[in-house]
Amino acid sequence: MINNADLWVVYDKSQEATAASGGNSYPFDTEVSLTVTARDKFDNTSAEIFQFKTETEYEHDNAVDSANLPETTTQVGADYSIVEVQSGNLEGVQLIYANEEPIKPGFGPKLTKRPTSLSVALR
């Protein structure tokens, strides 16, 4: 049996970007179920199933509409870049990231739903 432990799992759909897997994104308004199986050094395994629903097309369009995003500036350095919010409740908040990141981070629209947390506790 696996002892209680903390484990972070990162699932990157883009890493399975094949026609058979549906490409690098899920369709709008879809229930997704992921199974995470972990094995410890004694060959004990534990599996957890996580489910979430993808955003609707309307939610997506709203999220990427520039009218709903905070005003930001980006400073590009040699190795790292900084995105900073210029106005509103988040004014001064910064995202600092390595330039080699394949997907550049950014700020999204204000939340209309409570965020969903996906965490794993092995038992």
Image (tube, grey):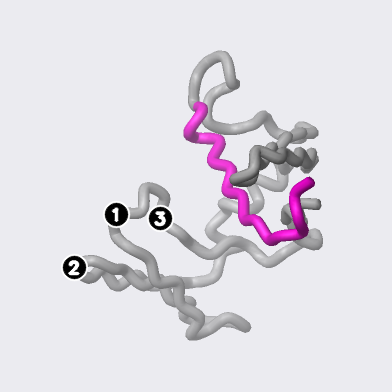
**Residue, disc 2:** 78
**Magenta segment, which residues?**
1-16
Q: Give the amino acid at mark 2.
A: Ala
Asked whether the viewer can see residue 123, the reply is yes
40 magenta-colored: no
Asked whether the viewer can see residue 53, the reply is no
**Residues at marks 2 and 1, CA–CA distance in whole angstroms:** 11 Å
Q: Give the amino acid at mark 1.
A: Glu
How many C-alpha atoms fall within 10 Å of the one at disc 3: few (<14), some, or many (≥20)? few
Q: Residue 116 placed where, x, y %? A: 77, 56
Instruction: Pick whichever, 55 or 5, lies toward us.
Output: 5
8 magenta-colored: yes
**Residues at marks 2 and 3, CA–CA distance in whole angstroms:** 15 Å
Looking at the rendered structure, the secondary structure element under dot 3 is loop
**Residue, disc 3:** 104
**Residues at marks 1 and 3, CA–CA distance in whole angstroms:** 9 Å
Q: Give the amino acid at mark 3.
A: Lys
Instruction: Pick whichever, 36 or 67, lies toward us.
Output: 36
**Residue, disc 1:** 100
Q: Earlier in the sequence, mark 2 or mark 3?
A: 2
How many C-alpha atoms fall within 10 Å of the one at disc 2: few (<14), some, or many (≥20)? few
Going 46% across and 80% down the picture, which residue do you hit? 86
123 sits to left or right of 61:
right
Q: Earlier in the sequence, mark 2 or mark 1?
A: 2
Going 58% across and 43% down the picture, which residue do you hit? 11
